[in-house]
Image (spheres, rainbow, N blue to C red):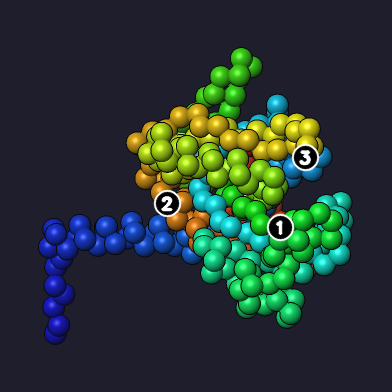
Amino acid sequence: MATTKKATASESTALVKWDEELAKQADIAAGMEANTGGGQFFSLKGGVLSWQDAPLPNNQMAVVILDSIFETTYYKGKYDPDAPQSPTAFAFGRDEKTMTWHENSDPEFAGKLCIESDVCQWGSADIGRGKAARETRRLAMIPAGSFNQAGKFELFEEEEHFASTAIGFMKLPVTSVKGYASFVKQVAGALRRPPFGIVTKVKVVPDPKTQFKVVFEPIMNIPDELMGVIMQRHEEAKATIEFPYQPADEEKAPPPKRGSRAAAMPARGRKY
């Protein structure tokens, strides 16, 4: 009769470590599947910052920016923000020089290098000397705290909040891209941290030239005791952020499937 080998203490410890790592990877994999059909986006319509159709107090929020990527979209005909439609062609990436149009784009574009497309050349816009394609950023964020009546920031203390709250996505207006790039460089140079290493104030403010713009301001470093869970969420965001656009009639995504308070609580209790 075969005997069962008894695990040594070191082997038991190794198994526990693998269980922990596999549990992390399971969360990432589940997150990828939950976001396959699209994600929940912040609205910037009319210069009003909104989440799930509810305007945010003082047009601002405190978040951890978990990840960001380059995004290029092209709409045939005039783009109308009031009439949701899927882009004719779209692309995501972390290197603008190697980005190719997504396979779900119009066959005229799918698989081709963006930088070689006519719509990505200066002067291709119908009006002015700009580009017909819109080159911007897609951000992935989770709420990090709130502002009290005096305007002072208060960090959420529960680790579970940072582990389970829904990721929200934002497509920056083209005119806010330079400001975001400057913010990332500022944080890297002065604080020696990536955006997901700090809490950021994201605020929408009026702008005389472009109606409004999105501005970013560092608030504080993420406490060391929360960095473990933030790193996990960063990996999750990296795995989910490139979800494709859906056809126009499917573009309105359902609420996030993660068991988060941000998705489940009423508007007055929302975290963003």
Point out the frontmost of discs 2 and 1: 1
Residue extending furthest top? 150
Kind of residue at badge 1: Arg
Q: Residue at the location (74% across, 80% down)?
A: 108
Kind of residue at badge 3: Thr
Residues marked 2 and 3 touching at CB (< 8 Å): no
Measured in 3D between alpha carbons, the distance from the residue under mark 2 to the one under mark 3, in whole angstroms, is 37 Å
Mark 3 secondary-structure assignment:
loop
**244 or 175, which lies in front?**
175
Q: Picture coordinates of residue 211 (x, y %)? A: 79, 37
Kind of residue at badge 2: Gln
Point out the frontmost of discs 2 and 3: 3
| Disc 1: which residue | 134
| Disc 3: which residue | 210
Above or below residue 140? Residue 240 is below
- Tell me the crowding category of disc 1: few under 14, some 14 to 19, or many 20 or more residues within 10 angstroms, Cα based: some
Res. 166 in view: no
Q: Picture coordinates of residue 233 (x, y %)? A: 47, 50
| Disc 2: which residue | 232
Mark 1 or mark 2, which is nearer the start of the sequence?
A: 1
Side of 130 where 145 appears, left or right: left
Q: Picture coordinates of residue 256 (x, y %)? A: 64, 53
Which corner quadrant of the image does residue 153 belong to? top right
